Image (tube, grey):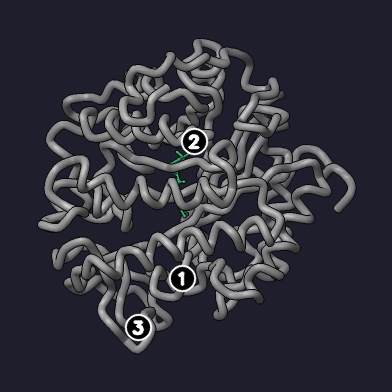
Amino acid sequence: MSPANPSTSSPRVAQRGSLFEPVQLGPITLPNRIAMAPLTRCRALADGTPGPMIVEHYTQRASAGLIISEGVNISRSARGYDLTPGLYTDLQVEAWRRVTQAVHACGGHIFPQLWHVGRVSHPDLQPGGALPVAPSAIQAEGTTSYTPSGFKPCPTPRALATDEIRTIVADYGRAARRALDAGFDGVEIHAANGYLLEQFLRERTNRRTDRYGGSLEDRARLLLEVAEAVAAVCGAGRTGIRLSPVSPVNASEPDRDPLNTYRYVVERLNALGLGYIHIIEGVTQGPRDVPGGFDYAALRNAFRGCYIANNGYDWHLAIEACEEGRADMVAFGRLFIANPDLVERLRLNAPLNEPDPASYFGGGEAGYNDYPRLVPHPAPR
Ligand SMILES: Cc1cc2nc3c(=O)[nH]c(=O)nc-3n(C[C@H](O)[C@H](O)[C@H](O)COP(=O)(O)O)c2cc1C
């Protein structure tokens, strides 16, 4: 395969099978095809360390084939929500080690989702009260940042200078190094939902005239440099990336030809040999169908690693997607909030608990670690 012309590489090998059967993700064999989707819950300590409550939360959900953690900030200036965890201090690494050890003790696997929010932030969260940064000085209208004094509108950000971008790529690489030091099995890069990497990728939020803006190749450059930097640290097979090709959340208007944009990205990711793409199909937490549609099969067929499907999946859709070969794995978000034993419940097609949106963000154990289980938790705890 020539990296200069990745689209000519051999087609992917579909891992058609049952949702409950093992699947190969890069070098890792996962016991089932059920992933826990990344879920920000704003329950970390003020210094960005995950405390005992978070250890308990992920331990409860360790029967997932793969846990993808909540968004984890790569640096202090990557933050857009108070009480979200980070991977930029030694203390954070120590704290995450307790999470990974507990998950591994239950036979689970866990990746952190590396996150930079870009313009979806507020000076109250930024070092020195600075403006948040973005590809261009375009405000995310109608969006809010969760500051220590509550939700506040996101201001017009400051456009990054070209030489600052190198620092951000390095921050991703360092956070990936810290993730391995903390015992994570790999890393997911958050390039979805209107945050920094998607702001660079999309035509409407990126008006740059340097090598990081303009053509599709230039808009995708930061995302690909980050993927390369993280893969260099973790190994490409242990690196995944989350994309939301048509989701408009966080004021992120999709491109006019999203399939063209994302097919290009995926073909370039092939050249790096990434382990998986994690695709939010439709509007995040909203309709799976959007006007004009989107050809997810084309994206899946263009990519040679695993395809993790997400958004609005239930028992029936998930089983069908795996058996018909439309996905290698399915990620569940809200169902994992409410069902720590989701894997066992899906296996039995048992009734599911309903999540309580009032306790999604912030607070304590209530609505976080107290959802009832059908079956006892596997030892050891
Ligand atoms: C409370 C909450 C927090 C979320 N946090 C994140 C996050 O940190 N990173 C991310 O990529 N998506 C996040 N999402 C989106 C979910 O990962 C998922 O895409 C969405 O819930 C749709 O999947 P579902 O229908 O299975 O819930 C969040 C969703 C919810 C409800």
Identify residue type, mark 3: Asp
- Frontmost residue, 151 versus 113: 113
The image shows residue 298, relative to residue 179, as above or below, that is above
Q: Residue at 12%, 35% (x, y): give it.
A: 256
Q: Is mark 3 within 8 Å of ligand 1?
A: no
Of labels 3 and 1, the one closer to you: 1
- Frontmost residue, 159 versus 228: 228
Looking at the image, which residue sits at the far bottom?
Answer: 128
* Residue 141 visible to the viewer: no
Instruction: Using the rendered view, name the quadrant where residue 16 is placed.
Output: top right
Q: Which mark is residue 124?
A: 3
Label 1 residue SS: loop
Q: Is residue 1 left or right of residue 119?
A: right
Label 3 Cα neighbours within 10 Å, binned few <14 / some 14-19 / many ≥20: some
Label 1 Cα neighbours within 10 Å, binned few <14 / some 14-19 / many ≥20: some
Q: Residue at 51%, 43% (x, y): give it.
A: 333
Give residue 175's position: percent from left, percent from top.
53, 62
Q: Which residue is mark 1?
A: 75
Give residue 88's position: percent from left, percent from top.
54, 71
Give residue 314's position: percent from left, percent from top.
51, 28
Q: Which residue is mark 2?
A: 274
The image shows residue 31, relative to residue 177, as above or below, that is above
* Residue 167 visible to the viewer: yes
Mark 2 or 3 closer to N-term?
3
Of labels 2 and 1, the one closer to you: 2
Quadrant (top left, top right, bottom left, bottom right) of the N terminus: top left
Q: Residue at 29%, 53% (x, y): give it.
A: 194
